[in-house]
Image (tube, rainbow, N blue to C red):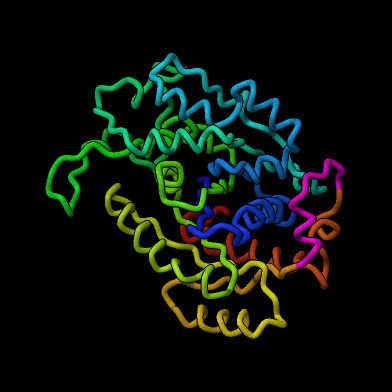
Amino acid sequence: MTFVASIINLKGGVGKTTTTVALAETLACVYNQKVLIIDLDPQTNASIMLLGEERWIDLDRSDRTLACLFSDAITGRAPRFDYMATLQRNVSNVKGAEMVDLLPASLDMMDMQEVLAVRRFEPSQSSYLPAWQNPSPPPIPAFGMDNAAVLTRIAKDEQELVFDLPVGLLSRVVGPYLAAYDVVLIDCPPNLGTLPQNGLYLSHAYLIPTVPDHLSTYGIPQIVQRIHRFAERIGRHLPPLGLVLSKYQSASSVHRAKKVELEKWGDLPVFEGFLRQSNQTAAAGEFNPAKRTFLKKYGDSDGNGPSLMLIGNEFLNRARQFDASL
């Protein structure tokens, strides 16, 4: 079974995309996992980090990003989204991490999220339940509900029939292809709008990267509460895997104190491994087509390489609660 996790935080600048890409490369290189990154963030940082701007522009101009999927739903046109043409294979520049693939994002998804957020879709509307390329599409994986079930769910807090937002679009189109992977990581934008809801709808669990300071952690309880309400609304259990601390500075008394405080929360476990603030990790976020070793990219004892190995191991141990085959 494929394990799917959304990487999310409502605050920008906390190392969310860096954590997503670094974790994917760690799982592939160190733990021999086949990994798919789904970039749902309209800022497209993960896409450009892995593809480079020139290649990404070419894909964007030729409708080979996830924007095409959401545009199909908005316009109700004959579907143009082509999964196999959009999928970018072997995108990592880390030697031994060739098993990392990517579904890229587009800047256009920012406007699409706003359109999707104000629309409601009747079950009969073909734009919401399209036939896609296959009139008899493969069954949606067990971890996702079908769109009709979401659309007809009775809201517990309203006690009336509601037509939900189009949160199942990604699951309906991309879900059938995920069995090819061990792990899928979804890089979500820093909000809980329609795009991240599509990611959460597809996920078994979610991971929250954060800088250990007051402003970066202030809204974490609200994230957990809102995702819990969303999970209840779609009739699913969607637990947090925990917190991954990023940009950690051991010399900072603020970071040290906040780390201790977070570790006392209990209900939201903190990963033992954490990402230190370092120039090497910042440089790893720049596109570089040259192949290099994992430790060359992320550092050895003085960098984040060992910490990422620890984070990857913790991630798989927690994911095995869902699938023992990982």
Question: Horizontal placement of 132 versus 105: left or right?
Answer: left
* Residue in the image at 55% along x and 84% along y: 260
Task: From the viewer's side, name the closer residue of 223 and 204.
Answer: 223
Looking at the image, which residue sits at the far top? 78
Picture quadrant where residue 58 is located? top right
Q: Does the magenta stretch include residue 89?
A: no
Give, as a single range, the part of the protein colored magenta: 278-291
Residue 301 in the image: state x and y as whole percent. Answer: 82, 72
Task: From the viewer's side, name the closer residue of 84 and 67.
Answer: 67
* Residue in the image at 85% along x and 53% along y: 293
Picture quadrant where residue 129 is located? top left
* Residue in the image at 75% along x and 42% along y: 98
315, above or below 193, in the image: below
* Residue in the image at 41% along x and 61% along y: 223
Count of labels in the image: 0
125, above or below 105, in the image: above
Looking at the image, which residue sits at the far left? 159
Residue 116 in the image: state x and y as whole percent. Answer: 38, 34
Question: Horizontal placement of 172 versus 161: left or right?
Answer: right
Question: Horizontal placement of 62 versus 74: left or right?
Answer: right
Q: Does the magenta stretch include residue 285?
A: yes
Residue 119 in the image: state x and y as whole percent. Answer: 31, 33
Task: From the viewer's side, name the closer residue of 319 and 211.
Answer: 211
Picture quadrant where residue 274 is located? bottom right
Residue 25 in the image: state x and y as whole percent. Answer: 71, 51
Give the position of the C terminus as an image quadrant.
Answer: bottom right
168, above or below 124, in the image: below
